[in-house]
Amino acid sequence: MEAKKMRFGGDIFLSNVGVGLVVVGPEAPLVAGLANDLVKAGIPTFGPSSEAAALEGSKDFMKRLCFKYGIPTAKDQFPFQQAFVLTGAPIVIKADGLAAGKGVVVAMTMEEAYDAVDSMMVQGVFGSAGARVIVEEYLEGEEASFFALVDGETALPLESAQDHKRVGDGDTGPNTGGMGAYSPAPILTEELKSLVMRSIILPTVKGMSAEGCKFIGVLYAGLMIEKKTGLPKLIEYNVRFGDPECQVLMVRLESDLAQVLLAACRGELSKVLLEWSPGSAMVVVMASRGYPGSYEKGSVIRNLEEAELVASSVKIFMPEHHTTLTETSLPMVVVYLV
């Protein structure tokens, strides 16, 4: 069911038909309070309240939480004019609100930095999400994605993944929602994963509880493993499974996902032991020319269905409700190798 329909009587429908679990996928309905409505209606719901979803819905909220509870993250400065003078390029400009994964600009020159601020705050390319910007120090290193299921008190780590956001080959071009990913992430050793849990995930869970907005759902921590220290810093939080990161995790998960998510809703994650396949998974995103900007819709994608005939380990997932490879009006089709 589409999220917008859920806000207008969908909870009543789900109650009447006896739905046992709702997993809220996109970030926008979470920030808007869909999980609040469902829980109020007595429906088991995996996904944070609107208050807890502010971890993704507001970069400023996340940064303030990090500083208050000692969670390692990039330094930020405000107002941006002062940051530009004191820091210089390279520098990172972020829209405070939701921008579909495209609200971050890594400015390598001051001209790019001013252009980013102008596009967000003056031109309004992200609407109200860009009315406020966060200016951060540039961190050099390797990015990785860390996932944990949270039941309000307990955090259960998932396997790691690494995504690639820039649209062009060689890590070039603007950021996208994700052009590819693989799992596990080689850079996240067992020692580093333990450190991420101790220094980032658990302090976040405890901090959110102390702030009166317990987190129930999935915490997706975007990390930078700093080149100069080898230590992880938090770049951002997502409060839902990422795309395409979710797919490379799910094809490796051997446990019953529904039962695991129900345990999170019941506050019983401490009883769960996850089982994973020992192999690796990789995703490649095929996007229409022009993405993530304006792009042609309805392009014919030829011969892709033959990929699944090459090997049983190749899987094709269509975006949203589309069932053919020739009628999609969305920007991407994804191929997975397991």
Image (cartoon, rainbow, N blue to C red):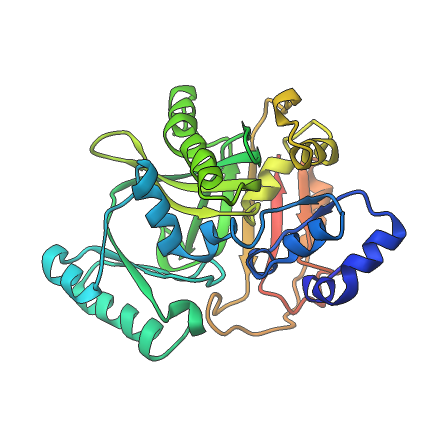
Name the residue at 23% across, 47% down: 75
Above or below for 84 versus 220: below
For the N terminus, the image quarter is bottom right
In the foreground, 39 or 191: 39
Residue 126 visible in this rendered orientation of the protein: no
In the foreground, 208 or 222: 208
From the top left corner, tell me how far across and down residue 210 is, in percent: 45, 38
Corner quadrant of residue 84: bottom left
Name the residue at 41% across, 33% down: 203
For the C terminus, the image quarter is top right
The extreme bottom residue here reads 123
Name the residue at 40% across, 26% down: 198
Above or below for 82 versus 285: below
From the top left corner, tell me how far across and down residue 235 is, in percent: 36, 45
Above or below for 239 versus 319: above
From the top left corner, tell me how far across and down residue 175 is, in percent: 40, 58
In the foreground, 64 or 158: 64
Corner quadrant of residue 330: bottom right
From the top left corner, tell me how far across and down residue 114 is, in percent: 22, 70
